[in-house]
Image (cartoon, rainbow, N blue to C red):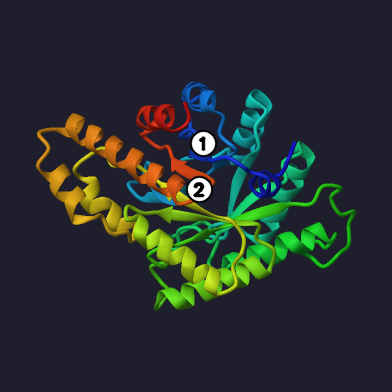
Amino acid sequence: MKSVADILANQSTPGFSIEVLPPIKGKSINQLFADLDKLTAFHPLFVNITTHHSEPIFLPLADGNLRKMFVRRRPGTVAVASAIQNRYNIPVVPHIICSGFSPEETEYVLIDLDFLGIHDLFLLRGDNDKETFVPKNVSHQYASQLIEQVNNFNSGKSIDGSDFEKPSTLFTFGVAGYPEKHAEAPNLKTDIDRLKQKVDMGADYVVTQLFYDNQKFYRFVDSAMSAGISVPIIPGLKPLSRKKQLSVIPSVFGTEIPQSLVESISSASDDNEVKKIGQDFLLSQADDLIHHGVNCVHFYTLGAVDTICNVLSSLFK
C-alpha cells in the first residue's frame, strides 16, 4: 500500500482525507464502520484516527472517600487503525501524541504498528491543559521530540539506546499546522519557524487546524513557502451545525469565525437551519480551496458525517 507521502506527491486531481475518532470506551466499532461505509464511497485518500490521553476521574469508596484513577474515554487507536485498513484497504494514519504517553509507551505503539504493517503516522503534541496519568516531566513536551524518536526508531535505535533491527518499511509522518497560529505561539512567524523545524526533521506534509476564513489559509501557505516549507499543506475543515459552536470553537481551537457566518447562524430559527447554513458554507469553502489549487482537503467528521457526505457528493461527483 502506498504511503500518504507518495499519494500526495502523485496526486494529479483534487481529493480529500477524513479524520475519525475511536469509539467511546464500551461502545462497539459498528457505528464507526457505518459512518465509514458512507464516507469511503467517495474514495478518500487516507483516514486519520485520533489518539486520546487519560483523564482523571474520582470513584466513591465505601468509607466515603474518593479514589482517583485515570481512564481514556476513547482507547483503541491502533486497533481501530488496523481494522479500518483491513476492512476498507485504505491508508490509515494513527495519531501519536506527547501528552499522557511516555517515550516507552510510544515505542511499544511503534512496534505494534510495524507488526501490523501500518507505517503512516501523524505526530503532534496533543492537548496540554489537562492532568494526565503520565507526569509532564516523563512525557515528550514537543512534537519535535516525537519526531526524533520516530527517526531513531527508523534507524534501529531504541529509546534505551540499544540497537535493534530497523523496520523494513520506514515510518513516514505528517504534522499539524495552524493558519491562525498555535495558541501558545507568540506570533505566526515563530509558529511557522517551529513548523519549518519539523519539516526539516522529516515531516512529509502538514494538516492544518480547522479554520473558517480561506484568506488566512492562503496567507499561511504563502508565509510557509517563504520560510522554505515545500511539503503539501492540507487545509482542515469542519462544518458548523449548532449555535453553541459559535462560542465553543473559537475558545477551544483559537480560530475566528467570520462575522457574516456568525450573523447567519445567530439568526437561524433552529439547529436544523444552522446545519444547512454550515453545510452550504463548508461546500463553498472547500470549492474555493480546490479552485485555488489545493489537491487535498481534510474533513473533521465528528458529528458531521451526513453533512460531509452531502458536500462530497457535490465536490466529487
Q: Is residue 68 visible?
A: no
Specify the amino acid type for callout 1. Answer: Pro
Where is mark 2, residue-wise?
A: 52
Q: Residues within 10 Å of mark 1 (few under 14, many from 20)?
A: many
In the rendered image of this protein, does residue 30 appear above or below residue 91? above
Query: Viewer-proximal residue, 178 or 158?
Result: 178
Where is mark 1, residue-wise?
A: 22
| Residue under the point 55% across and 75% down | 227
Q: Is residue 125 visible?
A: yes
Specify the amino acid type for callout 2. Answer: His
Residue 117 place in picture, x, y as percent:
76, 39
Tag 2 secondary structure: loop
Report the side of 196 relative to 1 (left or right): left
| Residue under the point 23% across and 39% down | 242
Check contact, mark 1 vs mark 2: CB within 8 A. Answer: yes
Query: Viewer-proximal residue, 102 or 39?
Result: 39
- Dividing the picture into quadrants, the one containing residue 144 is bottom right
Query: Viewer-proximal residue, 244 or 174?
Result: 174
Residue 25 place in picture, x, y as percent:
48, 34
The answer for how far apart the CA atoms under marks 1 and 2 are is: 9 Å
Report the side of 161 relative to 233 (left or right): right
| Earlier residue among tags 1 and 2 | 1
